[in-house]
Image (cartoon, coloured by chain):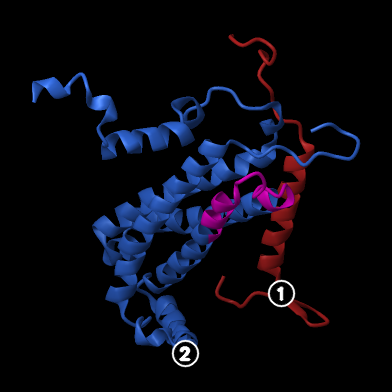
Amino acid sequence: MSESIGTEAEVPSWTRATRDFIGKRLPLAHFLPDRQPAYVGSWVYVFGVATIASLAWVMLSGVILAFFGPQWWHVTGLGRFVNSVHFWSVQALFIFMVLHLWGQYFMASWRDGRAPTWMVGVVIWLVMIVTAFTGYLSQQNFDSQWIGVNAKDAINSSGGGAFFNVLNFGQMYGIHVMLLPIGITVLVILHIVQVRAKGVVRPIEGKGRGA
Amino acid sequence: MDSPAGYINWAFISISVPNLIVIGGMVLVFALALILPFPHSTSTKSSKR
């Protein structure tokens, strides 16, 4: 037991392999940088952070709504305020996410090995849309009933009705407050780690300029 | 608030006024983000402040 201390360098180890894997791809200086290239000094790069800030407000207000329940968010003044915060932070989230998408699209930010970062962003976008749809179905008012009655035809025509009943509040609410938020959180963390690992993409060089 | 939104119809394009305002605002914010100068740190050239 004690003689293994000095000779462990050659022993195969999941821990060491994981440490080496992370250390090569995401050193701490890349993960928590205190300086950025000069080209990052543009308001376009603020949209991604604004999206995350909006998501934080969505999550915070959503946790409060889930804790106190539908009657509270429909009847009490504070509940209606938090309900409104949840709704408007979602609007901000989608607006900033689309502005972030426009910025990354026009600078072709999938270049130089960043395609997986782009693809994870696309998946986050799609999951966000499904989350918003289930959110509209979880309002517990006539609006959500109307949306559900119409949405059932759309989802049934796609075959998804075999798995999802949009008129089932429990199923939609569970998906909205548990499964999809967990997925979004994991994907957003992965997206940020991918950005930090590769760094911000260089601007597209104009003609006559050196690389 | 309870009345339906007005719609703008142009050829095959049909869009509500609120949606058009939001999209127009987003285009404006995007253009401003490209045009407006970003406040830089005063210690751009020195490695430490």
Q: Quadrant of residue B12?
A: bottom right
At 27% from the left and 66% from the top, the residue drawn is: A71
Outermost residue toward the left? A1
Q: CA distance from mark 2 to mark 1?
A: 23 Å
Quarter of the C terminus of chain A within the rendering: top right
Tell me the crowding category of disc 1: few under 14, some 14 to 19, or many 20 or more residues within 10 angstroms, Cα based: some
Q: Mark 1 is on which residue type?
A: Ile
Q: Where is residue A76 drawn, in percent x and y?
A: 31, 59
| Residue at image mark 2 | A153
A98 left or right, relative to A67: right
Q: Mark 2 is on which residue type?
A: Asp
Tell me whether the residue at label 2 lies in contact with that at label 1, contact meaning CB atoms closer than 8 angstroms: no
**Which one is in front, A57 or A31?**
A31
At 70% from the left and 60% from the top, the residue drawn is: B23
A170 left or right, relative to A180: left
Query: Residue under mark 2: which chain is it in?
Result: A
Q: Where is residue B18 drawn, in percent x and y?
A: 66, 66
In this view, B10 is above or below A87? below
Query: Residue under mark 1: which chain is it in?
Result: B
Chain A as rendered: colour: blue
Check chain identity for marks 2 and 1: say if they share one.
no
Chain B as rendered: colour: red
Q: Which mark is residue B15?
A: 1
Q: Which segment did they paint magenta?
A: A104-122
Quarter of the N terminus of chain A within the rendering: top left
